[in-house]
Amino acid sequence: MFSETPIKRRKSSRIYVGDVAIGDGAPIAVQSMTNTDTMDVDATVKQIQDIQNAGADIVRVSVPTMAAAEAFKSIKQQVDIPLVADIHFDYRIALKVAEYGVDCLRINPGNIGSEDRIRAVVDAARTYDIPIRIGVNGGSLEKDIQEKYKEPTPEALLESAMRHVEILQRLNFDKFKISVKASDVFLAVGAYRLLAKEIDQPLHLGITEAGGFRAGAVKSAVGLGMLLSEGIGDTLRISLAADPVQEIKVGFDILKSLRIRSRGINFIACPSCSRQEFDVVNTMNQLEENLEDIITPISVSVIGCVVNGPGEALISDLGLAGANKRSGLYINGERQKMRIDNNNIADQLEQQIRDYVKTKDEQALIDVKIVE
């Protein structure tokens, strides 16, 4: 039973990365980046497909050389999810991947070179009708900005961002999104808040180089949660030193927790205590592992006792309230006559969830046909 988020989104213009709408109220897109060698086409294609299967809307691929651009051409032909090419320094790479069908160019106009080279990239983006992402990073600010501010500050990131924005505006190109990432939460949040007031283009969120899986997920949740709760952000990436698939899962979990976007099961589970009537921790581990294929948004509460169990179950699509030997099952807030045997609770609840999702999906198809 999901309710609408109370968050009011920042107004922004809209661009398209492939067929994915970004900005102007479109669902916040979740993306990740491959960490394979782009020259290894098979490995990169497989990883892109794994990321896509996890729910990603967009995948970014690093293209550091002209040889990698040729590999990108083959990669692009084998996948059907929008791809962003990450390009630095050599403007000719951007021209080549634009020709090969890239869906978005991620560049820093400042490190592409002379304005003639930037103009060539912009002209290619215009010709092939693809957007650009300006990527500003607290760890790679221009030397003059570093000298001016002495250290990365929100104002320094903003100045760098606006410098790049002005280049594109001077070239009469407005199909772009922009990020001002930093590894420090407050630095990134401060920069995004400033930038959100200066432009109306979509903003791509991220806490860059956030760390390993656990620490990086926490840092990203704190930083992005602050911005998203203020309505800032149109697309995001969780930057983890981990499997890119985990970045997608964490991204959706953050959006899910703020009721911004739902994919899959939102589990409400107690941390367990001596009141528990069944093994909550092992039950949850089994359910989460076995139900990763479910993408239909539903809420499921798994509570080990009757203190909070019935209350949580009443506001969940499915709920389990622990009781002696057999636990109570709730569906759509109504307690069912059947009870769940505590000795085999995970398997039984999994089947109830799958049956519920099947019915919900079938009803959704019926509703669509009625509307048509």
Image: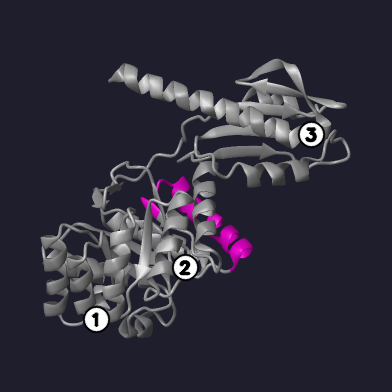
Residue 257: percent from left, percent from top: 55, 43
The residue that disc 3 covers is: 344
Amino acid marked by disc 3: Asn
Q: Nearer the viewer, residue 121 or 223?
A: 121
Q: Which tag is nearer the camera, tag 3 or tag 2?
A: 3
Taking the view exactly as shown, the residue that stands out farthest to the top is 337
Quadrant in which the N terminus appears: top right
Q: Tell me the residue at 51%/35% (across/down).
A: 297
Q: Is residue 359 positioned above or below 301 on the image?
A: above
The residue that disc 1 covers is: 90
Question: Few, some or many C-alpha atoms within 10 Å of disc 2 (few <14, some 14-19, many ≥20)?
Answer: many
In the picture, measured across the screen, residue 38 lies left or right of residue 278, that is left
Q: CA distance from mark 3 to mark 2?
A: 43 Å
Q: Tell me the residue at 43%/66% (across/down).
A: 34
Identify the colour scheme used: one colour
Q: Is residue 164 positioned above or below 269 on the image?
A: below
Question: Few, some or many C-alpha atoms within 10 Å of disc 3 (few <14, some 14-19, many ≥20)?
Answer: few
Mark before the other along the chain sequence, 1 or 3:
1
Amino acid marked by disc 1: Asp
Whether residues under marks 3 and 2 lie with C-beta atoms below 8 angstroms apart, the answer is: no
Amino acid marked by disc 2: Thr
Secondary structure under tag 3 reads helix
In the picture, measured across the screen, residue 214 lies left or right of residue 180, that is right
**What's drawn in magenta, residue-wise?**
212-235
Which label number is shown at residue 208? Answer: 2
Q: Is residue 229 magenta?
A: yes
Q: Which tag is nearer the camera, tag 1 or tag 2?
A: 1
